[in-house]
Image (spheres, rainbow, N blue to C red):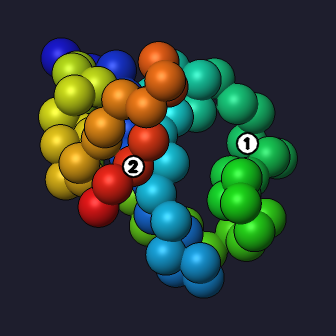
Amino acid sequence: MLSIYTVYKCRTCQREFILLTEDVDSMSKDRYLACPYCNSKRLSKGKGTDNLNECMKERVYKRVNGALKQVR
């Protein structure tokens, strides 16, 4: 079974972001992925998972005035 979410990490700014696997696969071959923070093409693909909480469990989030804020 194909995982729903895929984690990508930028090798330039060291930030991580999550994309839907289906959207990445549906992109045409002449397009490329880029970091949404620094627009770098240097990405490393992380693990794929079906649960979004598994992708986010490395960090600690705290709810501040109704919004999630990354603590660590």
Q: Is mark 1 on a helix, strand or loop?
A: loop
- Which marked residue is nearer to the observer: mark 1 or mark 2? 2
Residue at 23% across / 48% down in the picture? 60
Residue 55: image quadrant is: top left
Q: Which residue is drawn at 22% across and 28% down?
A: 53
Circles 1 and 2: CB atoms closer than 8 Å: no
9 vs 3, nearest the viewer: 9
User: In this picture, is 70 found above or below 22?
Assistant: below
User: Where the N terminus falls, by quadrant?
Assistant: top left
Q: Distance between the residues labelled 1 and 2?
A: 35 Å
Which disc is residue 68 wearing? none
Q: In the rendered view, does 28 fall on the left or right side of 22?
A: right
Q: Which amino acid does label 2 sit on?
A: Gln
Residue extending furthest toward the front:
65
Q: Tell me the quadrant of the picture where the C terminus can be found.
A: bottom left
Q: Mark 1 points at which residue?
A: 29
Within 10 Å of disc 2 (Cα), the crowding (few <14, some 14-19, many 20+) is few
Q: What is the crowding at mark 1: few (fewer than 14 residues within 10 Å), some, or many (at least 20)?
A: few
- Circle 2 sits in a helix, a strand or a loop, which is it? strand
The kind of residue on which mark 1 rests is Lys
Where does residue 40 sit, x and y in percent of width and height? 73, 71
Which residue does the image show at 40% across and 58% down from the upper left? Answer: 45
Identify which residue is drawn at 58% across, 33% down. Answer: 24
Residue 64 pos. (x, y %): 43, 31
Q: Is 61 situated above or below 50? A: below
Q: Dot 2 corresponds to which residue?
A: 70
Residue 31 can be seen, yes or no:
yes
- Pick the residue in front: 71 or 17: 71
